[in-house]
Image: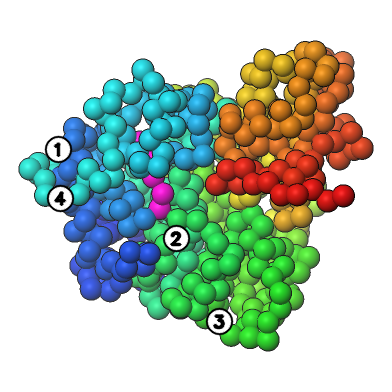
Amino acid sequence: MDAALSFANLPSSLHALLDERADRFGSRTYVITEGGEATYSDLARRSRQFAGKLMELGAQPNSRILVLMPASETYLGLWFAISRIGATEAPINPAYKGLLLRQLVETADPSLCIVDDSFREQFDQACEGLIPAERVKRPQDLDGPSAAEAISPSVSPRDISSIIFTSGTTGQSKGVMISHRHQLSFGQAYVEITGLREDDTTYNFLPFFHIAAKFVALGTMLAGGRMLLRPTFSVSNFWKDVCTHGVTVCSAVGGLCHMLNSQPRQPDDADNPLRLIYAVPVPWEFKDAFEQRFGLTLVEGYGGTENNLVAYSRIGEDTPRGAIGRPSPHFDVRVLREDGFPAEHGEAGEICIRPHYPGTMMSGYIGMPEKTLETMGDFWFHTGDRGVMDKNGYLFFLDRIKDAIRRRGENISSFEVERVLNACPHVAESAVIPVPSELAEDEVKAVVVLKEPGSMSEEDLFRYAMDSMPYFMVPRYIEFRDSLPRTPTMKIKKTDLRAEGITNATWDCERAGLKITRHGLATRATSA
């Protein structure tokens, strides 16, 4: 790790970091993809080329550029090119479609869209009449020489580099405005948590519309290391990739550790170069056995798109079982009661955060000033998470204060799933809740009241959901009821539904031989 780098001494922008590293490590490999290797100098050169093409295509400083494409070397070049011309990147989750996709595009209000061919049809259908065709380009349009000379404006560390859309865990998805300093500090935090060094190789299979992929990429660059980049995670190829490319550090979100742990044991499981997995969360139920089996260390971090990596477990420190770790030295992290006063040690409350350095948390929600102010009550960032701090300063995460579902590495808004289900002509209302999954995350259950009993089957509604929302949102479990439990103020009592979980009346798509995947619907014969 470069000792000169810290939260107080970061480059001024994303492209400034790339240029510094290209000057220092020019011929060193930065990224490995299925197409080969690219050095720091290669990426800097490509980002300059792309910057010229973006200007030629009409992009300007302070404009927004929507990006809908998978992770690749081309994506990395585009990401830094957008920074280089002083524009703002707005990456979109390609699983979104229809109304939900259109709303994100409307919020981003881009002057230029870079859309991969594989997502063009769904983009055009969702954005019909919204985005002129001449403002939608393909990644291939960035290739080749440019007649335009890229403008290199003076970019401030507080200028907005990206708009990252939340998964809408407490309502409609919000666009988080992230400055250059904020994004770079995420990368620096990752360096400090994992102890990244020049001789490390990270494994990045996370999507770049999430902040996690970005801080792995930036952390690798800050450390002067190299990164293996894959567009998706494959459990069958994981160890092959690790051993072939000498991967030493990776990030595990969702049930990744559970997937690796469930693989058949091999006598040489520990014979691999991986030294550390940054796990969110750490699977405490088998942490020690997992570390011993694979010969590595698990560390955990806590944070969010709006804030940063604000608490984490330390390498070599005996973190209490179930704890996230201790707060970062760069942030004040406190557990506050509902009245705003600090909770006692061991008392549950909301996890709230303040930064020590300017520009290391979000600049606000785009187009939602009231939500920004609401989140920053009493000048604390309110995470919406319940937690406990013990007398030794260790933080324990309990749950989300509002409804949230975590499935397949994605945060899912029950509000958005309900909104899509309620748009079905046969549905009167619905309530969506999490139920436990085999992979230590959640499965989605929808409790539904039909306008006319018998007007559709559970499979009909499942297929409607499959056609109307991202694959990871589609409910696995569906239960029809005559009515939903309510409070005296007529709010749906989701606490009752969560307590009931799976009942004898619950339909399970997998038991019916149906399963939704990122590639579409998979079917299999049902058991007798």
| Three-letter code for the amino acid on which mark 2 is drawn | Arg
Magenta stretch holds residue 70: yes
Give me the C-alpha separation between circle 1 and circle 4. 12 Å
Q: Which mark is residue 56?
A: 1
Determine the image quadrant of residue 487.
top right
> Mark 2 highlights which residue?
230
The correct choice, above or below, for 327 with respect to 517 in the image is below
Q: Return the disc, 3 or 1, that comes first in the chain's sequence.
A: 1
Q: Is residue 27 above or below residue 83?
A: below
The residue that disc 3 covers is 272
Residue at (31%, 34%) from the top-left corner?
Answer: 113
- The amino acid beneath tag 3 is Asn
Whether residue 353 is visible to the viewer of this picture, yes or no, is: no
Question: Quick check: can you spot residue 421?
Answer: yes
* Drawn side of residue 248 relative to residue 156, left or right: right
Which of marks 3 and 2 precedes in the sequence?
A: 2
Numbered range of the magenta stretch: 66-71
Report the side of 284 relative to 183 (left or right): right
Residue position marked by numbered label 4 in the rendering: 144
Snapshot quadrant of residue 503: top right
Q: Residues within 10 Å of mark 3 (few under 14, many from 20)?
A: some
- Which residue shows up at 75% across the image and 61% down it? 322
